[in-house]
Structures are given as C-alpha cells and as structure tokens.
C-alpha cells in the first residue's frame, strides 16, 4: 500500500519535472470545455428557434456556422492534445529507460549476476512500456477531469443553479466509487504483474537452460511449469478484466442515473413553466458532457494502476545501492595496519631478493603512485559482501610491477574473483585504496580506469553481432587490417577465414557455434586489439582440452609481450611462468615469490602444488 502510493507520488513528480506540456494539456482541456459549451449552446438555440419559435432555417444560419465551427475546433483540439500526450509520454518513458539502463550499468555485473535476467528484461521492457498508459492516458484523463467539469458546472450554475447543484453533488461521487473498486483491483493488478515477471523469468530460464533441461530430461517438467504460470497469468488477467468491466458498468450506470436525474428535474420544471425550453435543453445537453471526463478517468484508472504497479519494480532498481558505489576511503583508515611494503618486507614467507628488487624504494603509498616501476597498488584493502558477517579481504595488499607477470593463487573461495571484481570496479573496497598507473581510484571515472586494462576470462561475452563487430567492440576505430592482424596473432584468423561469411559471420548471443578454444582465441584477439597496458587473465585456458590449451597459451604469450600481467590462477599449471606469485589466504597476501621459493617456504603453496600434480 505504502509502496503503491509512493510509486504513485514518484510517477507524478517525474511527470511534472517539465510542467509545460501538462499546463498546455490543461489549457487544451479548458478550450475543449469552452468549445463544448459553445456547441451545446448553439444546438439548444438552433433547436429552440426551429421547433419552438418556428424561425426559418435561413435566419439561424450564423448559429449553424457556430455549431460547425465549434465541432471543428473540438476536433483540432483533440488532435493537438493527442500529439502532445504521446510526445510527452514517449519522452518520459525514454528518459526512464535510459536511467534504468544507466543504473543497471552502474550496479554492474556483480549485481546483475544475482538477478534474474528474465525479470530484469520484463521490468525494462514491459514495465516501462506499461507507464505509457499512465502518462499517455491516466494523467491526461486526470487533468481533463479536473478542468472540464469545473468549467461546465460553473456555466450551469450561472444559468440554472438547481441543475448546477445536482451536477456538483453527483459528479465527485464517481471518483469515490472508483477508488472503492480500485482497492480491490489493486491487489489483482499486483498479482497479475508479479505473475508476468515470473513467467518471463521461467521462459528465459527454459530457453537458456534448454540444453541442461534436455540432458536431465526435465524439459517436460519446465513445460508444465510454464503452462501452470501461463494459466495463473490468464486467471489473474481475467480477474483484472472482471474488475475493470465491473467498474466500467458501475460508472456508466451511475453517470446515466445522474443524467436522468437532471433530465427529470428539468422536465418537471419545464412542465411547471419554471424554466425556459432553450435553457433546459442547454443544461440537458451539457449534463452528459459533464460526466464524460469522470467516466474517462474511471476507464483509465485501471491503466494507471497497472503503470504504478510496474513502476514499483523500476523504482526499486533505481533505488538499489551499488556495491561499486561504496565510498572509497583513501589511505590506511585502520591505524593498526602496516603499510603494504612493510608487510611484504616483514612477511616470513616473502622471498627477500625478489621482493626488494621490486619494492625497494616504496615506503609510502604516494611514492608508489608516482613510481614508474609499479603499475598497480592494492593497499590494505578490506571488503565484505553485504549480508556477510566477515570480510572476504582483510587489509589485503600487493603490487603489480610494470611489465612483469604476477600470478595470484589461493584455495577456492579465498577471494581471487573478488580481487578481480575490485580491480575492474565492479565492487569498491570498504577500506584501503587501489592505485593504477599513478591514478587513485577515488575521483577516476570508470572509463579512464577500465581503458587501462584488458580482461580475458574463462567465459567471455559476445554480442549477437558479426565477429568483426565483436572484435571492433574493443577498439571502434580498428580497421579491417588491424582486426585481421590481431586475429592472426591470436590464432583465430585461420578458422574465421574458413567460415562461409568470414569475419561477417554472426556469433549469436553465446557464440555457441564456436568451440571453447575458438571463443577464447576471439577473446584474445579482442584483448590484443584493445592493447591496454594491464592484462588480466582469469585462467582463460582452464576449461579447455590440452590441445586447445596449448594453442591458447601460445596466443597468450603473444598477448603478454610488454604488458603488466595479472594472472588469476584457479589451477596451478600456468603460474610457473610468472615472475612473482602471490598467495592469498585468509583474505590477505600471506606469501609471495617465485614458484621454487614458495614450494620451499610456503606450506599452503606446497600443498596446493602437490594436490594439483597428484
Ligand atoms: P575465489 O574466486 O577465490 O574462488 P571468490 O572471490 O569468488 O573466491 O569468493 C570469496 C568468498 O566470497 C566466498 O566465500 C564466496 O562465497 C563469497 N562471495 C563471492 N561472491 C559473493 C556475492 N556476490 N555475495 C556474497 N558473497 C560472495
């Protein structure tokens, strides 16, 4: 209930950010009311003259012209009103969709991974589209209902106060009835919208997971589930329609009874001679026009409710706090913690020669930021996932020396992926700071930050477009020759050339027409094209067969030339080549050095190597 009314308020506020179109709509409604009055007055005068006064038709020609003019003006006003309404509603919707997409981008993959894509798609497409009814029909109807009846009732009061009083009392009863029926309708609309989102989620699940469903011969079950939800959706839609029809019936009945009341009241007074025929007819003609905006509003009330319901979910997304939007706190907020360089030097497992060679002059973070030999600094970073009582990373510190290969190892769940997410700004640290090529994360926008890195991971996303477009996504101004060269180096050119449409072959959403190794080679070509100084490899060859792995490793060797490489190693086969290996344990780097050094000095590393080789 509260959510519903707050969505209503927010939708209203959003509509009135730009007041001009709504003021214009109110003005058009006023002019429309004026044209109705002129039209009905003209009609009553013409009928009175011809039938009661027996005036020849020729004499009432100016009145007939007035009637035709009023009809034409009403038509033109309606036309302008519709254009204005549609334009305003489309602008608001486009703006909201843009905001929603911007928010989803800001929330980033760390958030979207926790959401159901079908539900998100339903909200961004159907949910926003439903607002069309709200902005293009419900609000204009509300404005019309506020302006037109007031103009008509004042006119009627001026010419016949008794009829004016009846209109004044009966008119507002219609919205009161409507809101009583609306309370019941709201629950039904909520149910309908929730079922629709559920249906979208299940449908997308079924499409994306078709292979798994088939393998487990569970497609019939999913089929039955979708059938069941479709049926629930049908029932809830019928429920909503039932209420919509019921409210329509009540409205029509009430408006007819109220008009009849005015007609009876005027008829009685006409017989008694207390009112003139022309005045009586004029009021009688105005009465249905007076109730019309109330009826229109009632009819659109249902559409407005649907819009408000779907807006609830849109606003919930807009209000979500991004994990990546946590405030960056610079420096060592934890007074107890040591600066990372001191930690490294004091760490009993650190390889002294190598670490000093890398870090010898770095005593303070500011110096690292400006130091040309260091590419990235992770300084006392602490991060806790919402809902978790303990941090995944706790005062975690390390450096990536420029143009060197650094590998990160740790048992599953130690926080390697979290470090990757922090580096790529999908998350922001609770404490500590991250510096990249001298730029502190604070105050650096995502674009500038991410431009400096290319990521190749186990799963890479492909847009449903051509191979060429997918490659050019990394560097939009890359020529065809650049693309071919990168593909050759990555070992992808050969198989792309063999495809019937070559580089213009469509990849499809998941690029499933290609093998795992081929997909990886395209991703490596993409990273080569980006040519970023830092290369993050999230074990790109781990899911491949030995032959593909060998080819990928060759391509990666080309990619790593002159780059600062950060290899997140879920398996240990690739770490040997690294200049320095970092061991992540209990949320911090507990040891670092070469493969042989760590084997001799770090128990955890030795255990991991033995487990892997056995
Ligand atoms: P690794 O990549 O080393 O296997 P992760 O960084 O994926 O480890 O995970 C570290 C810890 O954080 C795990 O305990 C995991 O359950 C938790 N974790 C990862 N992602 C989330 C998330 N989105 N929300 C809550 N906890 C998470």
Image (tube, rainbow, N blue to C red):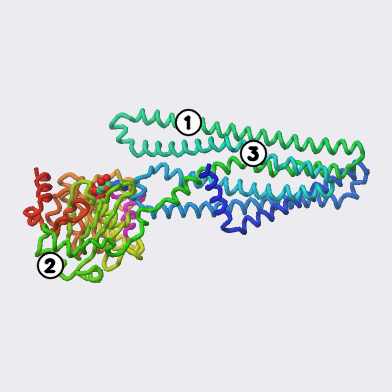
Q: Which residue is drawn at 37% across and 44% down?
A: 115
Query: Marks 3 and 1: in contact by CB < 8 Å?
Result: no
* Residue range highlighted in magenta: 457-474
Q: Which residue is drawn at 50% across and 44% down?
A: 310
Above/below status of 597 relative to 570: below
Is label 1 in a helix, a strand or a loop?
helix
Q: In which quarter of the image is residue 325?
A: bottom left
Q: Earlier in the sequence, mark 1 or mark 3?
A: 3
Q: In this view, does 6 lie to the left or right of 448?
A: right
Q: Give the dominant element type of the magenta stretch: helix, strand or loop.
A: loop
Above/below status of 295 relative to 108: above
Please state which of the two labelled residues, at mark 1 or mark 2, is closer to the viewer: 2
In the depicted view, which residue is nearer to us: 538 or 294?
294
Q: How many labels does the image show?
A: 3
Residue 70: x percent and y percent? 77, 51
How many residues crowd around disc 2 within 10 Å: few (fewer than 14), some, or many (20 or more)? few
Reading the image, the residue beneath label 2 is: 357
Question: What mark, if any, has residue 178 been given in the picture?
Answer: 3
Query: Marks 3 and 2: in contact by CB < 8 Å?
Result: no
CA–CA distance in space, label 1 to label 2: 68 Å
Q: Is residue 186 left or right of residue 462?
A: right
Question: What mark, if any, has residue 536 been given in the picture?
Answer: none
Q: Earlier in the sequence, mark 1 or mark 2?
A: 1
Reading the image, the residue beneath label 1 is: 232
Q: Residue at x 72, y 53 (%)?
A: 30
């Amino acid at each position: 209930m509260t959510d519903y009314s707050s969505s209503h308020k927010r939708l209203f506020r959003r509509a009135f950010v730009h007041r001009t179109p709504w003021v214009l709509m109110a003005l058009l409604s006023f002019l429309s009311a004026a044209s109705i009055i002129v039209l009905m007055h003209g009609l009553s005068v013409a009928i009175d003259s011809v039938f009661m006064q027996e005036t020849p038709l020729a004499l009432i020609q100016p009145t007939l012209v007035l009637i035709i003019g009023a009809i034409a003006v009403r038509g033109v006003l309606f036309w302008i009103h519709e254009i204005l309404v549609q334009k305003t509603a489309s602008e608001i919707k486009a703006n909201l969709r843009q905001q929603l997409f911007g928010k989803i981008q800001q929330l980033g993959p760390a958030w979207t991974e926790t959401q159901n894509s079908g539900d998100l798609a339903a909200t961004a497409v159907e949910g926003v589209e439903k607002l069309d009814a709200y902005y293009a029909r419900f609000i204009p109807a509300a404005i019309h209902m506020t302006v037109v009846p007031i103009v008509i009732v004042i006119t009627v009061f001026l010419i016949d106060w008794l009829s004016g009083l009846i209109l004044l009392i009966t008119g507002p009863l219609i919205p009161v009835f409507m809101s009583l029926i609306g309370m019941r309708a709201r629950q039904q609309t909520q149910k309908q919208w929730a079922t629709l989102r559920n249906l979208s989620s299940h449908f997308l699940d079924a499409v994306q997971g078709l292979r798994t469903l088939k393998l487990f011969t569970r497609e019939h079950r999913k089929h039955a589930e979708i059938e069941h939800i479709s049926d629930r959706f049908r029932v809830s839609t019928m429920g909503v329609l039932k209420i919509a029809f019921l409210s329509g019936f009540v409205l029509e009945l009430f408006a007819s009874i109220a008009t009849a009341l005015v007609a009876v009241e005027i008829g009685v007074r006409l017989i008694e001679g207390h009112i003139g025929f022309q005045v009586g007819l004029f009021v009688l003609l105005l009465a249905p026009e007076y109730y019309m905006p109330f009826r229109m509003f009632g009819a659109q009330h249902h559409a407005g409710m649907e819009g408000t319901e779907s807006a609830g979910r849109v606003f919930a997304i807009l209000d979500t706090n991004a994990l990546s939007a946590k405030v960056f706190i610079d420096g060592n907020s934890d007074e107890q913690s040591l600066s990372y360089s001191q930690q490294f030097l004091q760490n009993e497992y650190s390889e002294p020669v190598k670490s000093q060679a890398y870090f010898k002059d770095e005593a303070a973070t500011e110096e690292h930021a400006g130091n040309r030999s260091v590419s990235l600094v992770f300084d006392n970073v602490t991060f806790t996932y919402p809902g978790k009582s303990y941090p995944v990373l706790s005062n975690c510190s390390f450096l990536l020396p420029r143009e060197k290969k650094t590998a990160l190892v740790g048992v599953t769940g130690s926080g390697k992926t979290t470090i990757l997410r922090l580096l790529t700004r999908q998350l922001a640290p609770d404490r500590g700071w991250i510096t990249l090529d001298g730029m502190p994360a604070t105050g650096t926008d995502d674009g500038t930050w991410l431009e400096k890195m290319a990521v190749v991971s186990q799963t890479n996303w492909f847009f449903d477009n051509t191979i060429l477009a997918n490659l050019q996504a990394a560097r939009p101004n890359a020529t065809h020759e650049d693309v071919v060269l990168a593909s050759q180096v990555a070992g992808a050119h050969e198989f792309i050339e063999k495809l019937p449409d070559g580089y213009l072959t469509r990849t499809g959403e998941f690029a499933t027409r290609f093998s795992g190794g081929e997909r990886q080679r395209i991703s490596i070509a993409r990273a080569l094209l980006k040519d970023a100084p830092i290369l993050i490899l999230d074990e790109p060859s781990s899911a491949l067969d030995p032959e593909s792995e060998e080819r990928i490793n060759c391509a990666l060797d080309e990619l790593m030339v002159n780059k600062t490489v950060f290899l997140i190693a879920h398996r240990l086969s690739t770490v040997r080549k690294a200049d320095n290996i970092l061991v992540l344990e209990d949320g911090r780097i507990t040891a670092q050095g070469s493969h042989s050094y760590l084997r001799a000095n770090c128990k955890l590393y030795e255990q991991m190597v033995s487990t892997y080789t056995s």
